[in-house]
Amino acid sequence: KCFNFILKAIEFGKKNSRYYFLVVNASILFWKLARPFLVLQSIHHVVNTLGAIVKALTFIDDHNKKWLLSLSVSYIESLYRNKQIDLASKETKIAIKLAKEKCQEQLVEIIS
């Protein structure tokens, strides 16, 4: 239920560049709450919200690309564990492109 409130904050923050900080803050709060769910049996509870957060951070073009890429890697791993292989491979290509442009040191983490 708390993930719904995080998504509402993200949607509100995306509407105006003045509130983009809400998207970043909500992503940090989500990560603190969601990490325990990233085990195989509970991954399905967080994979959609994690995807929405990655898309929102991409939309606002946050300057902290390392944060975006680390969430992207977690999202990709979650998709693979949740057996959504097609979407995972699509997201992997997007993450690799972003890493090549902005954060080449994280490219190894994405590829492996």
Image (cartoon, rainbow, N blue to C red):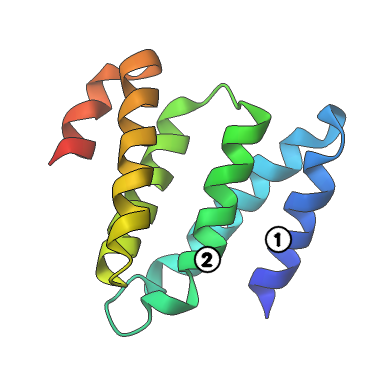
| Number of callouts | 2
Label annotation for residue 52: none
Residue mark closest to the camera, 2 vs 1: 2
Q: Amino acid at mark 2?
A: Asn
Front-lying residue, 64 or 72? 72
**Image height of 62 relative to 2, above or below:** above
What residue appears at the point 24 percent right and 21 percent down from the top-left corner? 105
Seen in the image, is 90 located left or right of residue 12?
left
Residue 28: % across, % down: 56, 50
What residue appears at the point 37 percent right and 55 percent down from the top-left corner? 87
- Mark 1 secondary-structure assignment: helix
What residue appears at the point 41 percent right and 30 percent down from the top-left corner? 66
**Image height of 17 relative to 39, above or below:** above
- Mark 2 secondary-structure assignment: helix
Q: Amino acid at mark 1?
A: Leu
Front-lying residue, 26 or 89? 89
Is the residue marked by circle 1 packed among few (<14), some (14-19), or many (20+) residues within 10 Å?
A: many
Front-lying residue, 92 or 72? 92
What residue appears at the point 66 percent right and 45 percent down from the top-left corner? 25
Task: Look at the image and tell me in which quarter the C terminus lies.
Answer: top left
Of the image marks 2 and 1, the number of the one nearer the N terminus: 1
Instruction: Locate residue 91: give its quadrant.
Output: top left
**Image height of 89 relative to 78, above or below:** above
The residue indicated by pointer 2 is 48
How far apart in space, not on screen, are marks 2 and 1 (Cα)? 10 Å
Residue 100: % across, % down: 31, 18
Is the residue marked by circle 2 packed among few (<14), some (14-19), or many (20+) residues within 10 Å?
A: some
Residue 106: % across, % down: 26, 28
The residue indicated by pointer 1 is 7
Which residue is situated farthest in the front direction here? 86
